Amino acid sequence: MRTPPDSSDPAGSIDQLPDQHHGLRRAVSADIPALSAMLARAFSDDPFWRWMAPSGPGYTVRLERAFSAQLRHLAMPGGLVHCLPDYRGAALWSPPGAWNTSLLGHLRYLPDLVRLCGAQRLPQRLYGIQRVQRFHPAVPHFYLQVLAVDPASQGKGWSRQLLEPVLAHCDRIQLPAYLETCNPDNIGVYRRFGFHVCQQLRLPADGPIAWCLWRSGTSGQRWQPGY
């Protein structure tokens, strides 16, 4: 049985991070509609979301609703959402001990997943997500749920501005960071910030490859799967 990290450890507290940092600010519930629209634009062609949701009429609307639900039920409760001015980009983080959302949080998200995937596709998609989560490390760490830059603002260095505050905090308190991606173009970007691929697997139902990436930073902590 997995032993959850101690989320009461003040070293990992997001309260030590400022609400604003060089143009970044912490998002609030009033930002959810604009952030959801930006995230849907940024991930419109992402392999994971194309696998999750059938293409065709209403795809963008379903994607936007899914990100709205993720922000409301998974990212903002107990987490940290940074956004750029004019919603050019966002980073959704979970601090140590907070990545594995409560059962109530998952149940609240379930109707949105049904609308996103369709009832027939949902079981295999949930199975694929569960397979990826088996590799989620058990040691305390910061988890990057989502990093996105609006397509109109990409290629201008915004990813660095979005990542720097939390990664610098991780180095100060000697905690690692972790993320997953299904877009191979992202791997080189994350490597520039000290991440390396620690695991990869193919999602079911002709799904994409999911890469798990780990950043030990100053902690030197080695990745170990949590299953």
Image (spheres, rainbow, N blue to C red):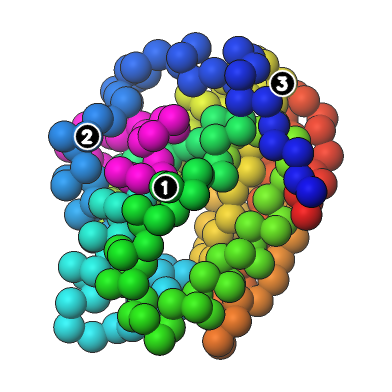
Q: Which mark is residue 105?
A: 1
Q: Position of residue 142 (x, y in %)?
A: 59, 34
Q: Quadrant of residue 42?
A: bottom left
Nearest to viewer (mark 2 / mark 3)? 2
Residue 91 painted magenta: no
Q: Position of residue 143 (x, y in %)?
A: 57, 40
SS category of the residue bearing label 3: loop
SS category of the residue bearing label 2: helix
Q: Position of residue 103 (x, y in %)?
A: 49, 49
Give neighbour class at mark 3: few <14, some 14-19, many 20+ (Cα, 10 Å): some
Residue at x 43% of width, y 47% of height: 104
Q: Earlier in the sequence, mark 1 or mark 2?
A: 2
Give the magenta range. Answer: 71-88
Identify residue for label 3. 174
Give neighbour class at mark 1: few <14, some 14-19, many 20+ (Cα, 10 Å): some
Identify residue for label 2. 29
SS category of the residue bearing label 1: helix
In this picture, residue 87 sits left or right of residue 72: left
What is the distance, in whole Å, between disc 3 and disc 1 at their CAs?
29 Å
Q: Earlier in the sequence, mark 3 or mark 1?
A: 1
Nearest to viewer (mark 3 / mark 1)? 1
| Amino acid bearing label 2 | Ser
Cβ atoms under marks 3 and 1 closer than 8 Å: no
In this picture, residue 105 sits left or right of residue 23: right
